[in-house]
Amino acid sequence: MTTNLRRIFRAALLLSVLTTSGAHAVCDQSAASTADQDLWNTHGCWQAFFLWEYRAYDERGGDWSGRGWNDACNSRLEYPKHWNASYLVTYGLLDNLAQSWHGTVDYRAAGEARSSSFHNSLYHTVVDDNGIFGSFSPQVFGPDRLATSCPLYDPGVSNANPASRGGDYMHEGWHAWLHKYGWNNGNVGGHRPGPQGNCTFSACDYFYFHGVGAYAFGAMYQTDGTANRFHSPNQAQVEYLCDISDQPKAWVPASVRLAAAADANTRASQRFINGPGYSCGDPRPW
């Protein structure tokens, strides 16, 4: 091959790499949101926790390379932000039998990797896509795939906070629940097409109303196959966010609670066909 041909070949190869890998911007690693930093300050980078968390959420080094996998105490990066949200899921809920929608045991089972009554085994990864918060992808071989993306990590985005990030673990984890039990929640990414009814978004759910006493802690996965005992992905997400907002442990920072309520209330007003569903702070039905 001549020198000129080599140059042409290398230029074409470089162009191919750039156009393939540059479809989305890399997540913003310049800072952590106020809510992320406020929660971080409560645990100060607890090493024992993140060494447990990567196994509990089945995160792999190849997926999180360059994102804090080897720098887990750098709160600006994606992996530390992921486990910061997991810390909130694991320890942040009051588990008030009289007022909480569900318990820590439910939310952990929905988000964590292990196979259970909530979903088949899954693993958590991260993608550079500014058009989504997250996605669930069933796999033919091995664990199913739960991905979170840049708008949950970029400090300039309102959803880039530990409550909203954990809320997406519930949302995508509930798609995994639907998949495990063979429920069809719609053909728009696992949702119903929109706008329709009170849903102004392109992908809509129903809110299946139930009282706070309808599910024993640990029983959120149960259904009788009717609207009387069922959850949609957005509903699972909103109920978690409102539990973080309204029923948190006393040490959960105000910035985290406020971010949870803002995300839940926006989602409730935009994404439920029979909405607004439920707003954080409303009296909880029995």
Image (spheres, grey):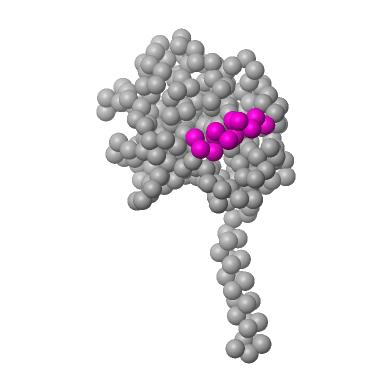
Which range is magenta? 45-56
Left or right: where does residue 127 sit relative to residue 175?
A: right
Q: Is residue 255 above or below residue 285?
A: below
Q: Position of residue 265 (x, y in %)?
A: 54, 27
Q: Is residue 49 above or below residue 134?
A: above
At 53% across and 46% down in the image, what residue appears?
60
Q: Nearer the viewer, residue 53 or 112?
A: 53
Q: Nearer the viewer, residue 154 or 235?
A: 154
Queried whether the magenta region covers residue 158, the answer comes back as: no
At 46% across and 27% down in the image, what residue appears?
107
Q: Position of residue 184 (x, y in %)?
A: 31, 40
Quadrant of the image containing the N terminus: bottom right
Quadrant of the image containing the C terminus: top left
Q: Nearer the viewer, residue 254 or 268?
A: 254
Q: Position of residue 76 (x, y in %)?
A: 69, 41
Q: Which residue is outermost to the bottom?
A: 2
Q: Position of residue 153 (x, y in %)?
A: 62, 41
Q: Nearer the viewer, residue 58 or 246?
A: 58
Left or right: where does residue 153 sit relative to residue 227?
A: right
At 38% across and 24% down in the image, what residue appears?
220
Q: Which residue is outermost to the left?
A: 225
Left or right: where does residue 210 sit relative to residue 20?
A: left
Asked whether residue 130 appears in the rendered view, the answer is: no
